[in-house]
Amino acid sequence: MPTSRKRTKKRRKIRFPVLILGICLVCALILLICGLILRGCRNDDEEIPASDSNTASEPGRHEAADGVFSMFVGHKVLVPEETVLYEVTDGTADPAGTVPAGALLDIDGTLDGGYLTVADSSFCIAGSAVQQSDRWFRNDTNLVPFPEDLATAESFVIRNENGEAVVSVSRAMEFPVYVKPDSGGRYGIRFMNGIYYIDAAEVAGVTPVQREASALAKEVPVLMYHFFYSEAEGGKRIDGNYVEVNELDEQLKYISENGFHACTMREIQYWMEGRANLPDHSIAVTIDDADPSVHQYAMPVFVKYGIHATNFVICGWQPPEMPYELWEMRENGMELQSHGFLVHTGGCSGMGHGGLLLCMDHTSGVEDITRSFDYVDGGFVFCYPFGDINDNAESIVRDAGGKLAFTTEGGRINPSMDPLALPRVRVTGGNGLSAFAASIG
């Protein structure tokens, strides 16, 4: 039977309050359940101290068990807000300075009272003051310290390579000198297993010390790779620039097991400038072009053996925003440097391979190389396209801010050479392990 409009309106009036009441009852039930859950979470978290990152806490106030913060051990943590830095003396953590917001710290252990020890140092930080980081790049160094120690002023700052403060210390300390200052005026010290810096203005003095003598490098072979492939996946060697992935594994295993030190480009720069010492059996590994096969086949092998390498990226051939593959390789110890932005092309007829830098106008060349250094986020090393170099090309690289530049000429490098015209040792696919060993021996 059809329902009249008047009865329909009446029913709607009755249903509406009932609907509201029902919704209220459901919401109340949900709030009750959430409250019980939150109470249980609070009970579980009562042992974790609240962050007191802006207060100079007295030692021992953090009463969490060591295990609460053990998740951070062996990882790189982020300090989200400025917090207190402590120094461990005779088992006691005393306030020693501050850690600025945004700093990344490597953690290697826990201490009673809820502290985390900062790797390769006498410092620690409250576990409640840090959070997990999405970074995992390795800190390491091959440099050998000079027989000198520096004494700091009563307060000083330890900075990363980019000049950003990592910790500010409010007491005088001493450190072995790993890198002597240049015109920029900063000393390199070992901190968190890598090289960090103290401004020369914050150094009170440097004194000679006795250290056990180490055999130092007089020359360094810089290896040159290009492309990689897998026979198991149907790949084939096109020419000598192609290295099979198992052949690469064999080579890196040899490096790893025979006392070689794979250096960063910054270490090579400091050594070339006479500002640092490299150990005997130092090498450097470079890979031209940043071909996709580097990420697919080579990176896992370099990670497997913990060996550092440098990718020379043709930046203009990459997407405008650096792809994840390049970022991932850098995090895994394969630094990024420049193979030019749009100069990896011909254009100079009858000159070498015809590389454009040979005859390019100076201003355009400097703009290209500067753009490529910016793309790799602070580049300072250049690899000449096709290995072509002349005075014009070298002056462009120098004025763009290049500190080192590599050709395809054969040979090892030493500090007496022109740093912007350095030779390398070509790795030829299929030559066998004996030839490879001889090339770096």
Image: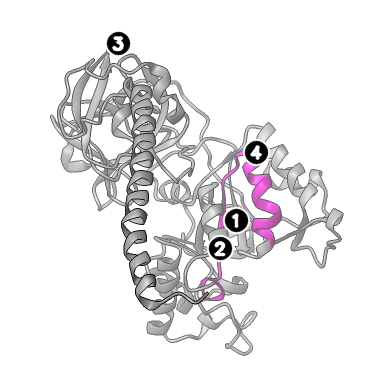
Query: Looking at the image, is mark 4 or mark 1 nearer the viewer?
Result: 4
Give the residues in magenta: 293-318
Q: Which residue is mark 3?
A: 91
In space, the residues marked 2 and 4 are separated at their CA atoms by 21 Å
Residue under the point 78% across and 63% down: 240
Pointer 3 or 2: first along the chain: 3
Residue that lies at the very extreme toward the left in this rendered image: 154
Front one among 349 and 251: 251
Helix, strand or loop under label 3: loop
Q: Which residue is mark 4?
A: 305
In space, the residues marked 4 and 1 are separated at their CA atoms by 16 Å
Q: Note whether 84 is above or below 320 in the view shown.
A: above
Dominant SS type (magenta):
helix
Identify the amino acid type marked 3. Answer: Gly
Identify the amino acid type marked 1. Answer: Thr
Identify the amino acid type marked 4. Answer: Tyr
In this orientation, does residue 178 appear? no
Pointer 1 or 2: first along the chain: 1
